[in-house]
Amino acid sequence: MGTLKDRLNDDLHAAMKSRDDLIMSTLRMALAAVRTAEVAGKEARELTDAEVLAVLTKEAKKRREAATAFADAGRTDQAAKETAEGEVLDRYLPKQLTDAEIADLVTRALAEGGFTGKAQMGQAMKAVQAAVAGRAEGGRVAAEVRRQLV
């Protein structure tokens, strides 16, 4: 199996052959974001799979937020398009953790690190994020850490 970027390119070519406009436009957008990340900084470089995954996660989050904003504004057609694009991107992301799984991971990480107060929120988040490894949004994780830190 190739890299995640190769898989995106292969799926884009397949979508072009089948003339699937939604997948085609979504993967073009995702690959453009990856290329932008590759040339950001002092010199161009090839992103690792983990970095490509981070770019895709950010793009999927943008789609969810845009869908919510469009739905709140009464633009259901645009909200549906954003939601569909997010679903295409979700195919390339790891399965998201449930709230119960997040709570369990947070409990274990706080116990292992000996974190007890809100003053240790930053260090606790660092420990929990390492355990979560991109399988849940930071906001959901932070809310659970805040809830458990007394």
Image (spheres, grey):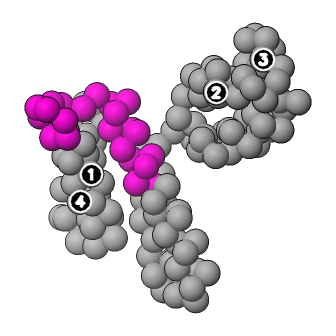
Q: Of callouts 3 and 4, which one flags the residue occurring earlier in the amino acid sequence?
A: 4
Badge 4 crowding class, 10 Å Cα cut-off, few under 14, some 14 to 19, many 20 or more, is: some
Identify the mark at residue 115; answer none if there is no mark: 3
Kindly tell me whether residue 24 is visible in this rendering. yes
User: Residue at horizontal 34%, vertical 33%?
Assistant: 51
User: Residue at horizontal 36%, vertical 44%?
Assistant: 55
Number of callouts: 4
On the image, the x and y values in percent for residue 77 come to: 48, 86
The residue mark sitting in front, 2 or 4, is: 2
Query: Which residue in the protein does label 4 denote?
Result: 28
At mark 4, the secondary structure is helix
The residue mark sitting in front, 1 or 3, is: 3
On the image, the x and y values in percent for residue 80 come to: 50, 77
Q: Amino acid at mark 4?
A: Arg
Image quadrant where residue 60 sits: bottom left
The residue mark sitting in front, 1 or 2, is: 2
Question: Would you say residue 54 sits in the magenta stretch?
Answer: yes
User: Residue at horizontal 68%, vertical 39%?
Assistant: 142
Q: Main secondary structure of the magenta part?
A: helix
Q: Are marks 2 and 4 in contact (CB under 8 Å)?
A: no
Query: Which residue in the protein does label 2 denote?
Result: 122
Image quadrant where residue 6 sits: top left
The quadrant of the rendering that contains the C terminus is top right
Query: Which residue in the protein does label 1 denote?
Result: 33
Q: Of callouts 4 and 1, which one flags the residue occurring earlier in the amino acid sequence?
A: 4
At mark 3, the secondary structure is loop
Q: Of callouts 2 and 3, which one flags the residue occurring earlier in the amino acid sequence?
A: 3
